Structure formats: structure tokens, C-alpha cells
Image (cartoon, helix red, strand yellow):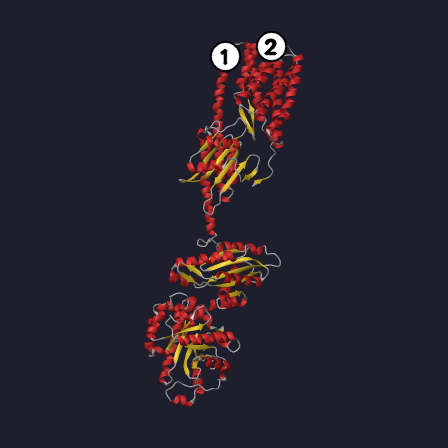
């Protein structure tokens, strides 16, 4: 995850490439000084005092950290001014080298760094001594002396700075060397001030040695003030950095880049080599382990410290701090592992969310060999960790809200909003020679499952369908839940035919039985298919049209329907019919047609089926399936059913008064059976028209009465108890069995016209009709064959023992007036003289072709 190329880092052992030339330069220059300058060592007492002063001055260090190295700014220029004035140059070189050696030993630097600093001090002092020798001889403490001493000490400072720049550039890269030069002005200014102070001290001492006492007091005061001021500056800088860090975390949390901002700034704030964030896996959030490392523009997915350090902090819920200035004696077992990882000090702080610990934040290795984390750093990191924990929790909360906004809570699939967004992007970047396919799966019978078994069972069905669809869909597909009982699949395919083929395959793969506890459910789906660019250029249009295709798929074989423009015009037409249907029911514009039902053996008229017809003043004849669907969706189905039922009972009463008692059959929608008041209303209408209940038959489609639940059973039993006959319409089109049908309170089975019309040409259809007739008769059920349209079909039905038929062979549906005329033309004279049912003539009705 690290971004960009890191700066080259070399071992400190390569510092000898700079140390060696510096040492050689110091030796050569020192020899030259010994030959041309005053004979050393000069006044040994003064040399000893100045050595002590240089060592003391080296303890007051202002460190400027340059990446992994520390640039130390010390006040050695003050004693160096005095040394060049009172001592021979060679002696100055010696005490400068000794002071540097003593200081490096006290700070316990590594050998390469220690010898580099000693060589640097010796080389700088020796070159400064040559400058001093080359300039006019020092006399008194006037301006001439100031310039000479200033030139010598400035040479010392510049040579030391050049050496530091060279070694850092060698080890860290030329960019680091340039960074040293950019940060050089403040130290150089400090050196100039130190030289001025040194000259002032020289003038004071030259005036009287007693001034040394005042200078010592002043030095102590300045040292105290410097320490207090440096601490104040450090605290001020820390507060400023924490403020900037908090603001950056707040801003980045909204953009999702919190770890990048957090770790980089913490590493800089704590002046650490590494800063690591660890968040254990939680829910859908995976484990996060990210590290910001010096010189790397980006984050690493590894950590410097071993995992046991973080695990221990997580378990103990306490801060873990190990280092030279931090102690950590209680973690001696970890010290060996840290040493193996080259970790000199580490602070690990738990991230808290309330009482829970959600992760850890750690910093490793204070920059420079002389730098170490101190107890003062712990509360700083702890404060940062508190802000970071809040920011991380807020970031996760925002992420969770975003996820919930685009995913379904039940199935965990992308929701409609997410699919619309993805579909919108997909249609923008469609490649030539491919289509963007949208498949809508509508789960059948979910409402019945919810009403019969409860919504918990319905939820299980949805989850199972979601799992099957996700497992069966191609890996390139986006599977989501559109809402309710609808699922969407979108992907790129070659053409619309491939989309239809895939829809059929997926439907077969998810329609297997679903077992819940001791219950087994057969769950089927209807699938609509739409593709871009054929069926729409935007997501909203595609979803609208695939919804229309899914609705149409419920009425086609195979339950898969590709969108076509006729579906949309039909849907728009239905939408416009809603208000007109209400007006038509109020004004009595709907007309009831009647289709005869006859016995096949002797062609006796047994009754009629009542069928609603509507001729719209603008649209013309409206198909029954259209206005029945409109009535269902607009809550007018009950009124429509009552209109047909009233007309049928009225005509049955009139026929009975004319000594032609005929039974009437009325179609019922499955939704009507859920109305608990419907059986009572039927009884009231039977009493109103004086029609015996046995002359009324209700026909319910197989899908409505055999929906796999017991929901319609109470209404069916109440109707049966009234004496009304019940018939299962369109039998054979569903997945019901006659064994299950036997348990229902029905009297009749109507074989679907698709099987009857295929009897003469398809042996399979003939076998199906034969089996239905035989088993139904064994169960005591009457059998009606729909769609009898030829004499051959009539003969086949007679041969297998079917009792009643209905179809165009006898008559199309007719209005009442034409039905009366048809009666007169078709009924044999001798049949009307007696009381038996009217017998039809053998000839067909020629007038029906005009309908």
C-alpha cells in the first residue's frame, strides 16, 4: 500500500565515507598548525577550564530532527571564541575533539556516529585554526580581534554544517541533504548570536576576571529560562499539532481517508519512525493493520512490532510502554522480541469506544539514536487516541449508514437504490456488441406464505431465494432485492436471447423445494427481462419495463417474458381504464355474456357460464383479463363480481319461470375468497332472487384454490355448506395433484382448454385428460372439458367418459338476447315439451362466426 518510491536509506556504517575524509583533513590541518602556529599546549589551566566549558555547553542541546537524524545546535561557539583567543590553535583542536568525544560517550551513540562527530569537531576546529593563523595576529579586544575570531568560529560552524549535510545526504538521499540546508538558517543565526555573546564575555573577562562570576550567574539564569521556554515551545507546538490533527481527522472522516491522515500526522507529531493503527475484525468490517513509515508516501499493511504487543494491549485494556526512558520492566518477555525487530521503544495505546476496546494505536522508535519516548509522550498519544477512536467510530457509523442505505436489511443484497445507481453507470459505458440485461424475479405465493405461516416464514423464503440467486448468478452479475418479493439481476451479455436463456436457467435453479422445519414449500418465480439499448436508455425506464415483463411472465408458459412495446401500451391502457371502470359499474355499462355447458353423451344443455364483457366508448372491446386486473388493483373486484352474480341469478330465475331451469356458473378471483363477508352476501343474493343454491356454481382457478396454503379453505367450506357447487377452473395448468384436490370441498374439475384442444394431435395431452377424468370420477368429482372445438375432440372425450363439455363447437359466449334465439334454434322440439333438460341438435350454430 505504500505510495511512491521511498527515499534510499543506507546503513550508518557508510558514514565512514564522510568520517574518513574528515579525520584525514583534521590530521593534515593539525600538523600544519603544529608547524606554523605558536607552540602548544599554552596555558593548561585555561585549557582545562575551557574543555570543561565546552563539555558543559554540549549538554544544552537544541535538536532539530531531519527525518531519521537529529541536527544538534549547541552553544559551544561561546567557549570556542575564548579558546581561540587564549590558546594556540592546535590546543583548541585537541580540546574540541576531546569535548566532542566526552559528549558522544555520555550520550551513548553508536560507534559510527560517535567517531563522525569527533572527526567533524576536529576537522572544523583545525580549519578554523588555519583561518585564524592566516589572518592578522590578534591584539587586544578591539574590532579587529572581533573580525578575526568571528571568521575563525564561523569557519568552524560552516565546516560542521557541511559535514552534517554530507553524511545525511549520503545516508538518507540528496532530498534529505537539501532539507538540512533549508533548515540551516535558524542554527546559523543561533551560532552568530553565540559568537557575539562569546565576544561580550571575552571583553568582560579581559576587563576583570571577577566578571566571570557574573557571567556564570547569567549563564545559569539563561539556561533555566531556555529550558522553561523550550518546554513551553514544545507544549505549544504539541497543542497546535493536536488541533490540526483533530481538524484533519474531522474533515477526512467524511471522505473515508481517515487512516491516511491520522497515521501520517501522528508519526510527525510524536517524531516516530512508525505509527500503526490496528482494528480487529468486527462484523462485516475486516481486520485493519496500517502503518505510516518515515520516507514512505502512503501506508504499509505491516507493522514493525510483533502481534503479541497489540494483543496484550487489547486484553489488558491498558497502555503498554517499553523503552529506555519508559521503563517497561513488567514486559521483559516482550523486550527480547522487540530487540529482534530492532524496536528501541514503543508506546501502544488502546482505542476505546465507551467501555469496549476497538483497536490500538502505536508509535515505534523515536527519531535519531539519541531520541527516546518519555513519560510526557504517553498522555499526548493517549489524547490523540481518544480523538482517533471517536473519529474512527464516526467513520464506521457513516460507513454503516451508507451500507444500510444501499443494501437490504433482510437479505444483505444491494437494494433498489444501489441497483439503479449501478445500472445507470452500466448503460453509460456499454461496449459495442453487448447489451446490459436486467432480470426481475417475482416470487409467487409469498403473500399466501405470510398470511398462512407468518412473516417469519416469508422472510425465510426471501433469504433462501436470495442465497440461491446469488449462488447461481454469474460472478459478473449484480444481484439485488428490488423490494417486497422482487429480486433484480443485472449484467452484460451478448444479446437479448442470451438474457432470456439465462433467466430461464436461473429460474429453474432457484425453484427447488424449500424445507423449513417440518414444512416443505414449492416456491416459483416469474421472470421479466429487459435489455439496454433495445428497451430503454436509462435505469428508470429499464426497471419500469422489466417490471411490466415480470407481470406478463405470470401468464405465459415457462414464466419468462422478454419486454415488448405491446406490454407497455397495455399497461398504460389499464391505468387509464381505472376511472372508466368505476363509472361503467355505476352506469351499468358492463354486459354479461353466457356460454352453454352441455352433456357430451346426449348433448343436453346443463347450464351456462356467466362472463363479463365491456365495450369501452373510446377503446372499444376491453379484454376481460385487462379490466379484471384493473378491478383487482383498484379495489373494485367485489363490485364486478356482484354485478355478474346478480345478472346470472336473475337469468336463472327467469329461465326457471319459463320451465327451462338452468344452472349458472360465475368465476371467482382468489382474492374474493379472503373476504369473510362474501359467503353471507351470496346467501342474501340467493334469497333475493329465489334461486336454489345447487343451481349456482363458483369457478375458481387452480392457482387460487390450490395455492399451497389453507387460506381459501374456510370460505370454500362455508359456500359448500350453503349448497353452492364449487369448481376448480383451468385444472392442469398448475402444480397441484388430484390427491390434494380430494381434500378440498369442491364438486367439479374443469380441464384446461390447452389440454383439450391438443387431444386430437398430442398423445400426451390425451393421456393427461384421460388421467384427470378417470381419477376425478373415482373421487366423485364431475369433469368439465373446456375448449371443445371439433367433432374429433368431442368423440375422444366421449370415449374416455368425460361428462360435460363447453366450447365453440356448441357456442361462443352470447349476450342474453342472442342466447334466447340460440335456444330456439338449437333445442329439439320434443325436449321442450317435457320437463327434462333441453337437448341440443346435432348441427352446429352458423351464426356464432359473426361474433
- Numbered disc 2: secondary structure: loop
Residue 104 in view in this figure? yes
From the top left corner, tell me how far across and down residue 799 is, in percent.
47, 81
Vertical arrangement, residue 816 with respect to residue 428, above or below: below
Q: Is residue 35 left or right of residue 720?
A: right
- Residue 213, labelled with which disc? 1
Q: Is residue 181 left or right of residue 278?
A: right
Vertical arrangement, residue 440 with respect to residue 586, above or below: above
From the top left corner, tell me how far across and down residue 349 is, in percent.
45, 35
- The numbered mark, 1 or 2, whose residue comes first in the sequence reads 2
**Camera-side mark, 1 or 2:** 2
- Residue 633, labelled with which disc? none
- Give the CA separation, mark 1 to mark 2: 24 Å
Q: Quadrant of the N terminus?
A: top right
Q: Can you tell which quarter of the image residue 397 is in?
A: top left
Residue 588 in view in this figure? no
Q: Can you tell which quarter of the image residue 474 is in?
A: bottom right
Vertical arrangement, residue 88 with respect to residue 652, above or below: above
Q: Residue under label 2, please give it.
A: 42
Q: Residue at x 45, y 56 (%)?
A: 463
The answer to whether marks 1 and 2 mark residues whose Cβ atoms lie closer than 8 Å is no
From the top left corner, tell me how far across and down residue 196 is, in percent.
57, 18
- Numbered disc 1: secondary structure: helix
Amino acid at each position: 500500500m505504500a505510495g511512491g518510491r521511498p527515499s534510499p536509506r543506507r546503513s550508518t556504517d557508510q558514514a565512514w565515507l564522510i568520517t574518513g575524509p574528515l579525520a584525514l583533513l583534521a590530521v593534515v590541518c593539525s600538523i600544519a598548525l603544529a608547524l606554523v602556529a605558536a607552540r602548544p599546549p599554552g596555558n593548561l589551566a585555561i585549557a582545562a577550564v575551557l574543555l570543561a566549558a565546552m563539555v558543559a555547553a554540549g549538554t544544552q542541546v537544541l535538536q532539530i530532527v531531519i527525518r531519521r537524524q537529529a541536527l544538534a545546535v549547541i552553544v559551544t561557539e561561546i567557549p570556542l571564541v575564548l579558546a581561540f583567543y587564549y590558546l594556540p590553535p592546535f590546543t583548541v583542536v585537541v580540546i574540541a575533539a576531546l569535548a566532542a568525544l566526552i559528549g558522544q560517550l555520555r550520550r551513548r551513540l553508536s560507534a559510527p556516529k560517535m567517531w563522525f562527530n569527533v572527526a567533524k569537531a576536529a576537522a572544523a576546529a583545525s580549519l578554523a585554526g588555519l583561518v585564524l593563523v592566516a589572518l592578522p595576529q590578534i591584539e587586544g579586544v578591539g574590532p579587529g580581534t572581533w573580525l578575526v575570531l568571528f571568521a575563525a568560529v564561523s569557519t568552524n560552524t560552516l565546516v560542521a554544517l557541511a559535514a552534517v549535510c554530507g553524511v545525511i545526504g549520503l545516508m538518507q538521499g540528496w532530498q534529505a541533504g537539501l532539507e538540512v540546508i533549508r533548515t540551516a538558517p535558524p542554527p546559523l543565526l543561533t551560532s552568530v548570536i553565540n559568537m557575539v555573546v562569546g565576544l561580550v564575555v571575552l571583553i568582560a573577562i579581559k576587563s576583570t576576571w571577577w566578571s566571570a562570576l557574573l557571567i556564570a550567574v547569567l549563564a545559569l539564569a539563561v539556561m533555566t529560562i531556555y529550558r522553561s521556554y523550550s518546554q513551553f515551545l514544545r507544549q505549544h507546538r504539541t497543542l497546535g499539532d493536536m488541533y490540526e490533527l483533530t481538524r484533519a481527522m474531522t474533515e477526512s472522516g467524511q471522505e473515508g481517508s481517515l487512516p491516511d491522515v491520522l497515521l501520517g500526522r501522528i508519526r510527525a507529531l510524536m517524531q516516530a519512525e512508525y505509527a500503526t493503527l490496528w482494528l480487529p475484525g468486527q462484523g462485516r468490517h475486516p481486520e485493519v493493520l496500517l502503518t505510516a513509515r518515515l520516507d514512505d508516501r502512503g501506508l504499509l499493511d505491516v507493522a514493525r512490532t510483533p502481534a503479541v504487543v497489540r494483543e496484550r494491549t487489547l486484553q489488558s485494556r491498558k497502555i503498554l510502554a517499553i523503552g529506555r526512558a519508559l521503563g517497561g520492566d513488567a514486559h521483559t518477555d516482550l523486550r527480547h522480541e522487540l530487540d529482534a525487530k530492532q524496536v528501541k521503544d514503543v508506546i501502544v495505546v488502546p482505542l476505546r469506544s465507551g467501555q469496549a476496546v476497538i483497536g490500538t494505536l502505536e508509535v515505534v522508535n523515536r527519531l535519531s539514536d539519541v531520541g527516546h519516548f518519555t513519560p510526557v509522550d504517553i498522555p499526548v498519544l493517549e489524547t490523540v487516541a481518544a480523538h482517533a477512536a471517536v473519529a474512527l467510530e464516526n467513520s464506521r457509523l457513516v460507513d454503516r449508514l451508507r451500507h444500510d442505505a444501499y443494501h437490504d436489511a433482510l437479505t444483505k443484497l444491494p437494494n433498489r437504490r444501489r441497483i439503479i445507481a449501478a445500472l445507470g453507470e452500466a448503460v453509460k459505458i456499454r461496449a459495442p456488441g453487448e447489451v446490459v440485461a436486467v432480470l426481475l424475479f417475482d416470487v409467487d405465493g409469498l403473500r399466501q406464505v405470510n398470511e398462512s405461516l407468518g412473516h417469519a416464514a416469508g422472510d425465510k423464503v426471501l433469504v433462501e431465494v436470495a442465497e440461491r440467486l446469488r449462488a447461481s448468478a454469474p460472478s459478473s452479475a449484480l444481484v439485488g432485492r428490488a423490494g417486497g418479493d422482487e429480486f433484480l439481476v443485472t449484467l452484460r451479455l451478448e444479446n437479448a436471447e442470451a438474457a432470456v436463456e439465462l433467466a430461464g436457467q436461473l429460474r429453474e435453479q432457484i425453484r427447488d423445494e424449500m424445507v423449513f422445519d417440518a414444512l416443505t414449500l414449492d416456491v416459483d418465480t416469474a421472470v421479466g427481462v429487459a435489455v439496454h439499448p433495445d428497451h430503454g436508455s436509462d435505469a428508470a425506464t429499464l426497471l419500469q419495463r422489466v417490471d411490466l415483463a415480470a407481470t406478463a411472465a405470470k401468464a405465459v408458459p415457462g414464466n419468462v417474458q422478454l419486454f415488448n412495446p405491446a406490454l407497455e401500451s397495455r399497461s398504460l391502457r389499464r391505468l387509464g381504464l381505472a376511472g372508466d371502470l368505476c363509472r361503467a359499474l355505476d352506469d351499468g355499462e358492463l354486459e354479461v355474456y353466457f356460454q352453454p355447458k352441455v352433456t357430451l353423451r346426449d348433448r343436453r344443455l346443463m347450464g351456462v357460464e356467466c362472463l363479463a364483457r365491456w365495450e369501452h366508448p373510446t377503446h372499444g372491446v376491453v379484454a376481460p383479463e385487462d379490466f379484471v386486473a384493473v378491478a383487482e388493483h383498484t379495489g373494485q373486484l367485489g363490485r364486478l363480481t356482484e354485478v355478474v352474480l346478480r345478472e346470472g341469478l336473475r337469468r336463472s330465475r327467469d329461465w326457471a319461470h319459463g320451465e327451462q331451469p338452468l344452472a349458472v356458473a360465475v368465476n371467482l378471483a382468489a382474492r374474493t375468497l379472503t373476504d369473510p363477508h362474501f359467503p353471507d352476501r351470496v346467501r342474501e343474493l340467493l334469497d333475493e332472487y329465489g334461486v336454489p343454491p345447487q343451481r349456482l356454481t363458483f369457478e375458481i382457478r387452480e392457482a387460487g384454490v390450490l395455492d399451497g396454503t389453507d387460506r381459501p379453505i374456510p370460505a370454500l367450506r362455508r359456500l359448500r355448506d350453503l349448497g353452492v357447487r364449487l369448481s376448480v377452473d383451468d385444472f392442469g395448468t398448475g402444480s397441484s395433484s388430484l390427491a390434494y384436490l380430494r381434500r378440498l370441498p369442491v364438486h367439479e374439475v374443469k380441464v384446461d382448454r390447452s389440454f383439450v384442444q391438443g387431444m386430437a394431435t398430442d398423445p400426451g395431452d390425451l393421456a393427461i385428460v384421460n388421467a384427470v377424468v378417470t381419477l376425478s370420477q373415482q373421487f366423485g368429482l364431475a369433469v368439465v372439458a373446456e375448449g371443445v372445438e371439433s367433432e374429433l375432440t368431442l368423440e375422444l372425450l366421449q370415449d374416455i367418459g368425460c361428462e360435460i363439455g363447453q366450447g365453440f363447437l356448441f357456442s361462443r359466449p352470447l349476450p342474453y338476447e342472442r342466447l334466447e334465439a340460440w335456444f330456439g334454434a338449437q333445442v329439439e322440439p320434443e325436449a321442450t315439451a317435457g320437463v327434462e333438460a333441453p337437448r341440443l341438435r346435432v348441427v352446429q350454430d352458423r351464426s356464432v362466426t359473426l361474433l
